[in-house]
Image (tube, rainbow, N blue to C red):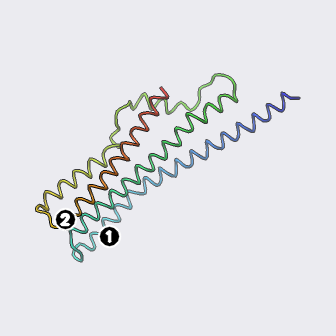
Amino acid sequence: MPQDDKTDSNDILLKLHIAEYQNLSFRNTNFITLQCALFPILLAFMLFVANFWNSFDPIILIWGSLLFAQFLGILWYWFRYEQYINICYIVQELRPLIESIINEPCRFWEYEKYLAKVRGKGPMWYECVIPIVILNIIIIIGMIRYPLTRLGFYGVLLNLGFFGLLFWITLIVYQMRKNFFNRIE
C-alpha cells in the first residue's frame, strides 16, 4: 500500500511539473508574439510620423522617431530575456525535478542542447543587429544635420543615452544565452 501512495504522489507531482512546463511554454509563445508585434508597431509609427512631417520641426520628428525605435528595440530584447529566463528554469530546474520522479536515465527536452551545438557560442545576428543599425543611424543623421542646432545636439545626447541602454540590455541577453549554452553542453 505505501508503494501505491508513493506512485500516486509521484504521478500527481509529475502532472504538476508538466503543467508548469506547459505554462512556461505558453508564456514564451506570448513573448514571441509580442516581439513580432513590435515591427508592425514601428511601421505604423513611421507612417504616422510621415503624416506630420510638414507640421512639426523635422529634427524633433527624426530624433523622436529614433528614440521610439530604440524603445521598441529595448522591449524586443527584454522579451528575449524573459524567454531565456523561462528556458533556463525549464532546463536547469524543472527537468531535474522530473528526472528525480522518473528515477531512471532518460532523454527529454534535448532541443536546447541541440541548439547549443548548432548555434555555437558567438553572438547571433539577431542579437546585435538592432544596436548596430541604431548607432549607424545616429551617426548618419548627426553627419547630415551637422552643424547641430541646440535641439539637434540634445537629440543626439538623448539618443546616445537610449543607445547605451539598448546596448547594455543586448549584452545581458547575449551573455545569458552564452552562459546557458555553456552549462548545458
Residue 173 lies, with reference to residue 155, above or below; the image says: above
As drawn, the label of residue 48 is: 1
Quick check: 18 above or below 33?
above
Looking at the picture, which amino acid does disc 1 mark? Phe
Q: Residue at x 23, y 64 (%)?
A: 154
Q: Amino acid at mark 2?
A: Gly
- What's the residue at 31%, 60% (across, down)? 67
Q: Which mark is residue 85?
A: none
The reply, left or right, for residue 82 in relation to residue 125 is right
Helix, strand or loop at label 2? It is: helix
Q: In the rendered view, would you say 107 is above or below 74? A: above
Identify the secondary structure beneath mark 1.
Answer: helix
The picture places residue 128, in percent across and down from the top left corner, at 32, 43
- Outermost residue to the bottom: 55
Q: Name the residue that disc number 2 marks.
A: 152
Identify the residue at image location x=42%, y=53%.
36
Q: Which residue is depicted at the point 26% across and 47% down?
A: 132
